[in-house]
Image (cartoon, helix red, strand yellow):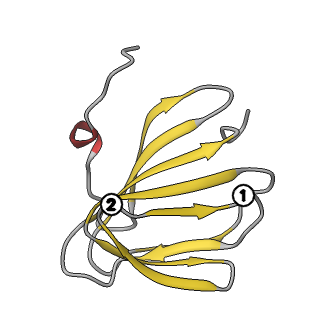
Amino acid sequence: MTMFAHYRAFIGANPEKFFKATMFQSDRLLLGLNCLEPGQEQHIHTHAGQDKFYFVVEGTGHFTVGNEVQEAGAGMTIWAPADAPHGVINRGDQRLVLLVGIAPAPGR
């Protein structure tokens, strides 16, 4: 496994639901890329005992974390502490590309 990766190598699309790709994973951290086409969403959900962040690489998303709702564009970071309900909708007209980190890694 290489220790270097360019995010564009992990971009993809799925017409049925948002696209997910794992970039790196260890027992302590999962780092991945989520791509949401216009109109797609990651429904509000929680991660028991796991912190999560989204970093907006491209596009704009409508994010919910707990009771907070905010639109965020390229360069913004969104933090979802363990057990906090969170999700995102792409209401824009361009693909939304998110770098996502979850710790500890799911299933570990």
7 in relation to 91, above or below: above
Q: Is residue 87 left or right of residue 93?
A: right
Viewer-closest of 32 and 73: 73
Position of the N terminus, as image quadrant, is top left
Q: Is residue 10 left or right of residue 48?
A: left
N-terminal of the pair, mark 1 or mark 2, is 1
Residue type at mark 1 is His
Residue receiving disc 2: 75
4 in relation to 96, above or below: above
Q: Position of residue 16 (x, y in %)?
A: 36, 68
Residue type at mark 2 is Gly
Q: Is residue 43 visible?
A: no
Q: Is residue 75 left or right of residue 32?
A: left
| Disc 2 secondary structure class | loop
Q: Report which quarter residue 21 is drawn in.
A: top left
Position of the C terminus, as image quadrant, is top right
Please count the marks in the image: 2
Q: Is residue 3 visible?
A: yes
Q: Position of residue 12 (x, y in %)?
A: 26, 51
Q: Report which quarter residue 73 is drawn in.
A: bottom left
- Which mark is drawn over residue 47? 1
Q: Which residue is found at the position 48% from the left and 58% from the top? A: 54
